[in-house]
Amino acid sequence: MQLRSTVIYNVWVALKLFFGTEEIRMTVKFENLKPENESKEKNARWRLLYVDDMMNTGEFSITHEFSYLTGNDYYIDVYNSKKDRTTSTYRISIRHFRAEFLKWIDNVIVMFNATLNALAFDNICHPKVMKWIEERKPSLDKLAVDCSFPSVTIRNILNYCHPKNEFYTRCEVFEPSGWTPSSETTKSTHVTNSLDFNDLLKLGVPIINSQCTEFTDNVLNDFLKNWTTSMRKLEYLSVVRTPNNPEINEDTVIEGLDVTRMEQTVRFERGGRTFSFTGYSILNGRGQKAVFGIDRGFLPMLKNINYSLIRLNYAIDPAILEEYLFLSPNQETIQFDINLKSELEQNSKIYETEHLRVASLGQPTDHFLLNFSGRSLFLENTNVQKETIIECLRAWNSDMRYQNLNFLSIELYDVFTDVRQIMNQFNVKEIEKERNPPVFMIPRRSFFLSGTYSVELASRRYVVNESNGHVATFSMSNKIFAFAVWRMTEKEFLDKVSS
């Protein structure tokens, strides 16, 4: 990779680094500086105009995003090249660590006078990366580490690059990396090496967000008693108790405190997102007020969202999910790691999502399959009854439901018993072995890399809808069932296969 010398005027260049087990990524963002005469009313939010893959070899990729700032509250492309402020974001990724990547980082910092904003680690800290940190001692705004890191590694990282604004600890149980099912790291076997509660406070960072922290109810009580006299830099604190520990006892936390219970939901903004919760308020000796609550699950209440990745630390009431979907209905894509206190209502808005992916950690998801009205549904790490699948296929076959369905994928947590019962209900046909099996492709949005990728189903077996004559191919094993609707008659389908 060669970098040419470039002169950039009136542009701020931010750099973010991510070191993971399956990807090493550098994100370089070029943002036009705000003109002095630009009003806040005129420019309210960023809009993504386009994404493209400049290079993708599998092992190495470069992705470019172009966004503009506008005051328009609706998702309509009204980009004005002469007036709107813009950003160009380049994501440079490699599959496996190479020492050359560290040289690329140095070149970007030197050539563009880039500011290193964020450094994140996911389950790995290569010795050469550690040496690079020790030599450069980078000044950064945000540091993110995995809770499974050895404590000595976390402390060494903090010695060399102490964050100025935010420290974040990620937990594999609560937030799986990439597409890894979180069940592979169970609560019972999980071991954390992350900083304990008091060590977190000693960092002196304004924003602390730790998904996996050792603390007792009494430690929280002491913190609330003493926040008036210390930790003046602290602005926001969110800690989640380690997953193999009991839930927080609210009565112990507030014991002996002069607190006021909030009758209404409090909404606040943090990092461009709006959160809401109910809890308590408390005053310190300087007359400053803080609010706190025991979070047993909430969602940021955002409007006009088209794509959502929803991962919940605790089981929440379905009503909270419905409130979120009321503000942002009819989303194109939702990826939902289900963790609900009870089953969703039959008329839930989530069933109307165009492309829905649900990971359920072994929980039943029959109700998603029975009520879904979108185009593609992926049920992963789940349990679904054979009878439910048969009922849905019969409804599709009679054109009673699923008129919009293009693709269905069910990946079981356990296994099907006597899987042949599912398709024995229908007149299954098969393309001759002399022909290549047709390949059905459907785009799927990635929440970790920009843009989309394709999901494919290659199968010779197919059925014909008795009502509209459309063909659907399918594949099944004792763990996976996949079903793809081609939107063409049997004659059109066979002609396509023959061509």
Image: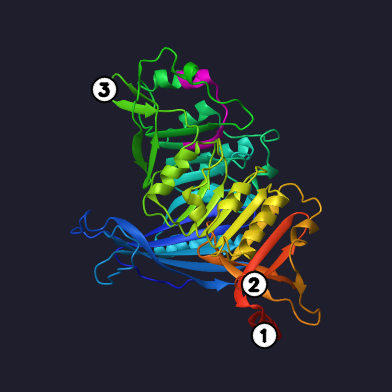
* Outermost residue toward the top in this view: 256
Q: How crowded is the residue under tag 1: few (<14 C-alpha within 10 Å), some, or many (20+)?
A: few
Q: What residue would you read off at disc 1?
A: 495
Note whether residue 96 is visible.
no
- Quadrant placement of the N terminus: bottom right
- Check disc 2 and give the amino acid type: Phe
- In this view, 235 is above or below 65: above
Taking 255 as reference, is 258 left or right? left
Marking on residue 287: 3
Alpha carbons under labels 2 and 1: distance apart: 15 Å
Residue 211 lies within the magenta run: yes
Compare marks 2 and 1 and give the one earlier in the sequence. Answer: 2
- Disc 2 secondary structure class: strand
Q: Nearer the viewer, residue 429 or 93?
A: 429
Q: Which residue does the image show at 61% across and 64% down from the upper left?
A: 407
Q: How crowded is the residue under tag 3: few (<14 C-alpha within 10 Å), some, or many (20+)?
A: few
- The quarter of the picture where residue 372 lies is bottom right
Residue 75 image point, x, y percent: 35, 62
* Outermost residue toward the left in this view: 37
Compare marks 3 and 1 and give the one earlier in the sequence. Answer: 3
- Disc 1 secondary structure class: helix
- The quarter of the picture where residue 36 lies is bottom left
- Check disc 3 and give the amino acid type: Gly
Marking on residue 440: 2
Q: Nearer the viewer, residue 212 or 101?
A: 212
Range drawn in magenta: 209-221
- Check disc 1 and give the amino acid type: Asp
Q: Nearer the viewer, residue 425 or 496?
A: 425
Compare marks 3 and 2 and give the one earlier in the sequence. Answer: 3
- The quarter of the picture where residue 278 lies is top left
* Outermost residue toward the bottom in this view: 499
Marking on residue 293: none
